[in-house]
Each structure stands twice: as C-alpha cells, then as structure tokens.
Amino acid sequence: MGISVGDLLSMDFFKDFHVIAGHKGLNREIQGVSFLEVPEGHRWSIGKELIFTSGYIFAEFEGYLDKFCENFIPSHAALVIKRGSYLDKIPEKLIEIYDRNSIPLITMPYSPSWMTVVNQVNVGVLNHAIQSLRIDISQGPGCYNQNYKEQAIQKILKTLETEMEFPAFLYDVTMDKRYYSSDNFKKASEKYGIHESDYWSPQLPHTSHALCDCIHMKRYRLLKGEAANEPRISWVTIPIESAGVVQAYFCVMESRKFLDFYDEYSMRIAYLMLQGIFDQQVVARDASNIGFENLIHLAMESTPADARQLIYQADQLGLSVEQPYLCILFRHDQDELDIRSHRTSMLEAFKRCRMNRIGRVAFLSSTEGVILLNAVRLSPVNKEEIRGLILEFQKLLRGAFPDVSWFFSFTGDSGDLHDLRPHIEKCRKVLNIGRLTDSRKTLFDYDALGILTWINIPEDELGPLLKKLQKLIDSEKNQELLYTLKTYLENNLNYRLTAEKLFVNVNTVRRRIEKVNELILVHWDDYVERTKLGLLLQYLQPGPDSIIHLKERRNGS
C-alpha cells in the first residue's frame, strides 16, 4: 500500500513541486524512493519508485541522456529533478519521453534536503495508509460489541487487499472464527495444500526469518519439493497478543511477489489497528466480568418479580436471558484461598483455554464458581468434548495454583438464565455425592453417578453408609462378599434365591453373609437402611469383575 503521485503532490509540502510532463500518470503508485546520480542507477530500478535526481547525471555525463531515453524503463512511478542545480532547463527529449509514457516528470525547489523530502514522502504514505484503514463504523450505545469488531476486522482486511493486492487472513483464537479479505486467500491455500495452522506453525518444509522482532512479524516461505532452495509461496504472519495471551493470528499472502517496504509499513499499521480492537475486547470483557457475575447472582436469587430487572441487566451485557447455557460447577478444597481475591489469575487461566471461546465464568463464593457454555455452539452436546474442555481448564488452574485441588461437575443439560439456580443446585449435588462416593476423582458427570443422582439420600447419611462399606470396598479379597451382599439385598434377604443367582450353594451364601456381619454392622430389620444400602450398591456395581472395577474407581479413572 503506497500512495499515488497525485495524492502525494496534493500535500502542502509538495506545493512547489511542478509537473512538467506525464500528467496522465498522476495515478501511478509510489512504492518506494530511489536516487539517480550515477550512470548505472537506472539498472537498479525494480518498479514503482519515486526517483530523485539533482540533474548531475544528465549534465555531467555526455551521451547519458540519449542512453537513458533509448533504454527507458517505464516501470518507475515518476522522476523528480531539482531546479537550479545542474540543469538550467529540462531537456525537451526528457519531457517528450515522459509525456509519451504517461509518467510524471516533476521539478522541485533547490533548497529542501533529500532527507526532508524522503521523510515527507513517508509521512504521505503513512497518512494515506491510516486514512484507508480508518475505522468509522458506529458502535452504537455501548463501548464495544461483537458486530463492531467483525465489521472492523473485515474492513481492514479488504482494504489491505484492495490497496496492496495481497490477500489477507485473520484467525480469531478467542472465538475460533476466521476472516478473509476475499476468496483469493482460500484459493491459494487450497492450491498449495496449506492448512490453517500452517500460517503460524507450518508443518511443510519451509524457511523463515523475522521482519520485526518486537511484534514477532515473520515471513514464511514454503520450499518446492526436490528443489529445496526454490520458494513456492510465502506469507507474513503477526500474532496479536494481549496480556501475554495470543488473541489472533494476522497473515498476508505473498502468492505472486514479496511485500515491499511500504506494504510492510501498511501491514504494521493494520496490525496496530487490529491489536487495538483485540485490546479493547479484552478490556471490555474484563470490565464486563463483574457485571456478568452480578447477573449470575441476580439469576440465582431472583423471583418472578425480578424478571424485568434480569432482562435489563442481561441486555446491558449484550446477553439474552433466553440463550441456552450448559452449566459447569467448580470448587477447590482450601478454605483459606478466596478465588475472588485471585480474580486476575483465575481469569487469565480461563482466557488461555478453549472454553473461553464459548463460555463465561463467574465466582459464586470464595471456593466455588460456575462456567456457562453457549449450548448453541456446543450443539449437539458431546460429553467427551465437555470433559476435554474441563480437563484443559483444570490443568491451567493447577499450574496457577499448584497446591490446590480443583473439582468439577456438570449435568449435560442446558437451560436459560431463568433455570440457572436449579441447574447449579443439580451440579452441586453431583459434586457432593461424587466426592463422597469416590474421593480420588476430580471430575463428576451427572449420568455417571447413575441412581445416586435422583434418589434422595441426605449427604449426612450417605457418608456414614459409604464408611460402613469401606472395609469391603478397600479390600480386594472382600469383593466377593460385596457382590454377595448386593445380590442378597436385591433378593429380599432370601438365601435360596441369592444362591441361585450366584450359582453357589445356599450354605456358601450363609457363610458369606455371616462374614459380612463380622466386618460391618447392618441392621437387617431396618427397611430404610437396607433400601439405602441396596441403592448405594447399585451405584457401586460390584460383580464378578468388581476387583478390577472398584480398583479403577478408587484410582479415579
């Protein structure tokens, strides 16, 4: 992205620069600056330069003017000659050839230094790039919204391709969303077999070198099969980071040629604008987190009379109370650690995980928090995917808080904000029962708990029942007794039916139950206790392979 000759000359600094030939070429693009003061100078032209000269080359080298005109290179943007230096008059032959090729021939004042002039050219290019990439999309009443972000990114990418003729691409890590300046980027990717992640972490044979270390701007060049020193295609990538976390990857494809100096200039400006958009997103998200947390507490405590307030507060955050969410509860085991006092570290860990793309987090107390995932973006709900997301976040929390154990529970059901309280209570029940029944595990699923999730055994009774069975559960040699006890209860304390079910002698059953009586105290006449014990054994599912089964359960698999 350079600047046209006409646009440059319209700047106040260039008001005394006079076009004396080639007026039809004022729309020619300037992509760099060079100087012509030696006979070989024209050979070093690569195209689109604004060439400056004092006229020395034409005045002092006999025959050079004829040679220059005979070997005229029409790819440069314009030629600028200083007035009153070495040429009292611009040669007619020079005027004629620039007119014929519609390339501007310009004279300039004697006094400005070359550095001053070149700096003003760069200022012109910079201002033109900023003006072209300028975002004037209205954000509406709020300070930030997703629609503004998407429109702004799309405008920047499309402007880059229009001005530079290089297709551009941005991958938004936080939202798992892709933006393209046009289909040209996709077509080039398909043509050369480049996968999306190759643009920032290429797996194909390639070379790379840094263009700007401070923003990690890097050029990648794929190598061409057997001709390992011949590039196939190249692109330039800049990661967009905020608070040390990569928010997006910004790429420009060099499918036909390399970016020149002014193109890189423009890409840097585009990067700064994109960086600003993502910084604004992070600040807005952090600022809105307190508002989201207040919304969650309101939803937890609201009554039908609070419905209007709930809708209003959700609307202020750009949310809908009708939006379906999947609820995940988390908790830690150290009363002295208040997660609300470590909000920054908690949110930083959340930003680094994939759940951040589709969910929000809120703290319910000093030890407990909730994550609401967008159920629409999870549709259909895949429990293994949810488990993977939770384990990723759990790992990040362990890294931030190495001495703390983190426990999670979820149900797999979705509901809107009106249903939040019963969903969280359900998750709490899953987490509490799960920790009682299997202290080694840290992730509990409603469906995995089976019958215990819908029977109403109070937690203060469930604990003692489990403790009563602990001698049978912890000893592998007692697994046979545990399975016999389960079958005996299922058959209403009938020895004969139990023996038939187990394919053993009745006396064998009697001996085993006597052994159970020696190890644990069971009130066989208490129907309620027997029922609760039987239901608990239904969950534990002891059986012929129970030695393996319960050993795995205790190990947290």
Image (cartoon, rainbow, N blue to C red):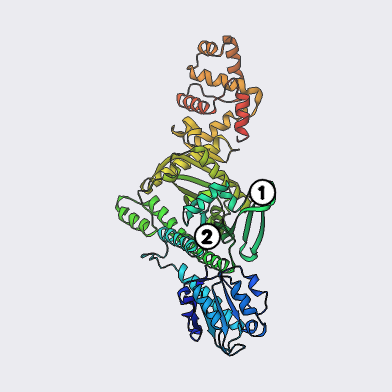
Q: CA distance from mark 2 to mark 1?
A: 23 Å
Instruction: Give the image location of residue 540, x and y in percent.
Output: 54, 28
> Which residue lies at the image location 61% right of the left edge and 85% below the top edge?
113
Name the kind of residue labelled 1 in the image.
Pro
Answer few, some or many: residues within 10 Å of disc 1's Cα (few below 14, many 20 plus, some between 14 and 19): few
The numbered mark at residue 166 is 2
Drawn side of residue 494 relative to residue 54, left or right: left
As drawn, the label of residue 205 is 1
x and y, in percent, of residue 72 in the image = 58, 72
Q: Above or below — where is 63 with respect to 403?
A: below
Callout 2 secondary element: loop
Residue in front for this viewpoint, 240 or 87: 87
Q: Quadrant of residue 51?
A: bottom right
Q: Hey, what amino acid is under mark 2?
A: Phe
Report the residue at 54% width, 54% height from top.
351
* Lower position in the chain sequence, tag 2 or tag 1: 2
Crowd class of label 2 (few under 14; some 14 to 19; many from 20; radius 10 Å): many
- Looking at the picture, how far across and down is residue 83, in whole percent? 56, 88
Which mark is drawn over residue 225?
Answer: none
